[in-house]
Each structure stands twice: as structure tokens, then as C-alpha cells.
Amino acid sequence: MPRLDLEAHRRHLLDHGDELVRQVLTGTPDADLPGLEVHTDAIHYRAGRDVTVGYQVVLEQDAVRQEEYLLATTADVTGEVATLDSEQFGFRVWRHPHDPVLASAPEAFSPDAVAGWLATAGLASGEVALTAVAYRPMRRAVLRADVDGGRWFVKLQRPKRHLEYLERMALLAPAGVTPPVVAVPAEGVTITAAAEGVSLAQALAAWSMQGAVEPDPASLLELLGRLPGGVRTLPPQRGHDVRLRMALETAAVELPGRASEIADLGERLLAADARAELGPVVATHGDFYEANIFTVDGRATSVIDIESAGPGHLVDDLATLMAHLVVLPDLSAVHYAQLPGLIDRWYAAFCDVVDGPTLRARTAGLILGLMSGAGEAQASARLDRALAWAPRA
């Protein structure tokens, strides 16, 4: 089977979203629908696999306003989906929250259903304020549930990933490094307690803007050192070289006008990877960055989102953190104006425990991995950051 031209499909989804929505709603791409508004909301690109685009749809007719969220994907999925095929393109479209892979999505996105889950588990009773924290179509969703002054998090995953998550929770929660699962109310669904303290992202913003206590990098190393040794027995995640090649492919899609720079950067990073000094295999978090790290009084005390925990190298957890920190000022200069100096200090501190050139190269590669769906301006800024961190030829 020939490889799908994901970039052509992505462009079509972006350029012809209005026609696609009209076809889903009426069966005709050029149907006359006065009062229809279609806005592209999110792009989810998985290099070599699929591309999915979310559309905010508003239809106002006869003073009645109807809002919907539609998603279109190149993935060959079944279920409550509309099939739009032509000689050039093929898409599957569904109405949120009827995700074709995440079977419990309609309930997980329903405040009433979540309230029932919490009540059945004896956790809380009353009206639930439900907020979507993250949604990756066909992969996972995280929702925050606030009720009775308490807070819980609802996580929705594919069946296989759900079982892997529970396996990791069985190792990590008893060690006190992540909030425990308090209920498993439906297929692919877990409910966890909220982590104590504030996220590292919040702690950094409070320090930068308000002069709060500066987060302590030594506590980050201590937290990683508390990951139980049993994590090393779990299946390993994809290798850095595989993720780097995927990031390079995605970067070229996001910024076709800078393809030659990306190709040159890729050669440098792959060469650096070949001579990397990784250190011993240890227990790693696998997605160690500021939103997944929680702090109390400036000290890192726990982590969330432990799906990627497994055997690996300390330098990769630290590079993941550094890559995310590097791009924060581009997202909000107001909140993170002081970060450049802190990044320099933390890099120096981390170089005491891992190889500095390897940390720099891996940070550059992971910055590239943050370009997907960032939009042209942010993607270009992130490429500049990656170039600045990459080793010279």
C-alpha cells in the first residue's frame, strides 16, 4: 500500500474545512447554509501515521444558535464516523465527544456522568464543574473535576495504554511519587486524586513575576531518584533516534520554507546522538516537564502523567525538562521573563550529573519535537531555539 501523503491531506483539511463541514452536515460540500461559521481549532500531526484537525462549528438559523465540535482524521477508524472519500483524499469525521477509539469519551466529557462516578466511588456528591485539560483525539483525554471543594482528575486512554498505565501506577503510587488512582469507573477510565502543591510551571511563573521562592533544581534530581527501581523492568519507550527522526519529519511539514535548515540540523543531531554519553540505565519518568512536576515551597515533590515511565537515561528526562523550559518565554514573556537566566543555572547544575554536550544535543532534538501543531510563528521560534542549542558541525 502506498504511503499516505499526510502533508497533502493536512493542507486539504486546513484549506477546505468549510466545505468538509458542509458535506458532513448536508451531504453536499457547496450546500447553502446561511449562518454557518467554521474555525480550525487544533491540528494533531503524528509523523508517518495520521493527521487530525478539530473544527469549531457554529450554525445560527432563525435566532437559534447551535455549536458543535467536529474532528476529521486520515486514520482508518470505524464507529460513529462519517466517511468522506474521493480519488485524492479520504477522511473520517466525528462529532465530539464520540471519539471512535476512546469508547468512554461521551461519559468522561459529561459532568453528570462524572458526578455519578464520583458518587459511586464515595468520593464526592454534588454538581461537578468539568474542565478539559488535554485531548489528543483517538489517544487520550484528561479532565479536571471540581466538586464539594475537592478536585479529581479523570483520565481516558486506549485500552492497551490504560492497562500499561495501571501497571505503572502499581509501582509509582506506593512510592509516594504520584497521586494514586482512586477509581476505575469505566472502560479506559481512571480517576486520580490531585497532586499536592502547584505545578512547576505555576511555581516558575510566581517566581518570575512575583518574587516567590525560586524552584530548586536539586529537588528535581532527588524526585527522579525516588522513582522505584521496578520501573527499570518495564518495557522501554521508543529510542531517542526514532523520536528525533519523527520530530525532523514533523518540523519539515510545519516549516517547509526552512527545510534545508532542518535537514542540516538533523544531520548534526544524529551525529551527536552517535557519540552521546548516556550514563547508566535508570528509572525514568519519560515525560518530565513543568506541567507534570508538582512543587511545594519551591521543592519538587511529585509527578503526574506517568504513562511513559520506564527504563532510560537521566539525561533524557533532564533534556525533556530543559526543552520545555526553553520555549516557555516564547509562549508568555510576561509570565516567564526571568527564565533565561534560570535555564543557564539549571543547565550548569545538571551538567554536574550528566554529560553536558549530550544534554545540549538532546534538548535541541526535543525542542524540535514541540513544533507539531504549534503554528507557523511558534514553530519558527522553536526551530531557532533548537538551532541555538544544537552542537556545531
Image (cartoon, rainbow, N blue to C red):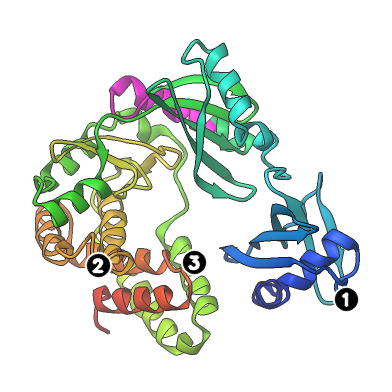
Q: Tag 1: residue type?
A: Glu
Q: Which residues lie in the magenta part? A: 164-179
Which mark, by number, is residue 333?
A: 2
Residues at badges 1 and 3 in contact (C-beta under 8 Å)? Answer: no
Density class for disc 2 (Cα within 10 Å; few <14, some 14-19, many ≥20) is few
Secondary element under disc 3, as helix, strand or loop, is: loop
Residue carrying label 3: 372
Look at 54% across and 14% down and name the residue there: 119
Q: Tag 2: residue type?
A: Ala
Look at 40% across and 37% down and name the residue there: 306
Look at 68% across and 43% down and name the residue there: 97
Q: State the residue in front, 309 or 128.
A: 128
Work out how far the residue at label 1 is from the one at label 3, CA to CA, in angstroms: 27 Å
Work out how far the residue at label 1 is from the one at label 2, CA to CA, in angstroms: 46 Å
Residues at badges 1 and 2 in contact (C-beta under 8 Å)? Answer: no
Residue carrying label 1: 87
